[in-house]
Image: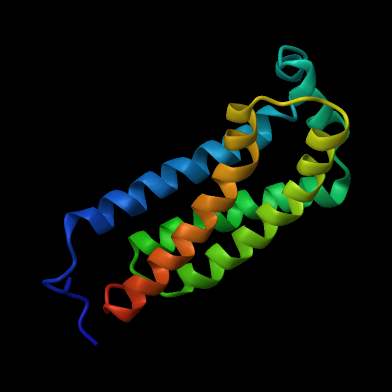
Amino acid sequence: MSDTTPASLRWTYWLIAVLALLWYAMSGLNFFVQMDAEVLSKMPESHRAIVEGRPAWATLGFAVAAIAGIMGCLALLLRRSIAIRLFVISLVGVLVTMIHTIVVAMTKHSFSGSDIMMMIVSPILVAILLIVFALRARSRGWIR
């Protein structure tokens, strides 16, 4: 196989890969920021309730989602098909984390529509879309 970029590989591939990396980098940063008690104390009560009450399995899911997502994006940038598996692992981590978040959101606090969209729907949607994108990239020969 040749390491040259196929003619059909457009600039949008690179844009999506870089934007996805930024998304997951922010997710990783968010994970570490939530571990800081001072930062946590400045969050709204509803957000603190999610973080402070998060069990170890949900915290592990968050870490797995962020790390696998970052690695998946790097694999996209390196044009490696392992990105697909990494994005699937990331989606599983997101879903594990969201189980806890949804339970807290539905039982303990009222969240606005924008909160639900940002905290629950967006991570799931991005993870699914990146799996679809990576599968499409593999079928077009953009990743190997």
Q: Residue at x 34, y 48 (%)?
A: 18
Q: Indicate whether 62 appears above or below 29.
A: below
Query: What count of labels does the image hold?
Result: 0
Q: Residue at x 78, y 45 (%)?
A: 59
Which quadrant holds residue 132?
bottom left
Q: For the view shown, which residue lies furthest in the bottom direction?
A: 1
Where residue 99 sits: x, y (%)?
78, 50
Left or right placement of residue 10 versus residue 44 in this view: left
Where residue 43 sits: x, y (%)?
71, 16
Q: For the view shown, which residue lies furthest in the left direction?
A: 7
- Check the picture and name the quadrant holding the N terminus: bottom left
Q: Indicate whether 66 appears above or below 87.
A: above
Q: Residue at x 33, y 80 (%)?
A: 139
- Check the picture and name the quadrant holding the C terminus: bottom left
Q: For the view shown, which residue lies furthest in the top direction?
A: 42
Q: Indicate whether 33 appears above or below 83.
A: above
Where residue 32 sits: x, y (%)?
67, 34
Q: Residue at x 58, y 36 (%)?
A: 117
Left or right placement of residue 55 versus residue 140 in this view: right
Where residue 81 sits: x, y (%)?
42, 75
How did the renderer colour the structure? rainbow
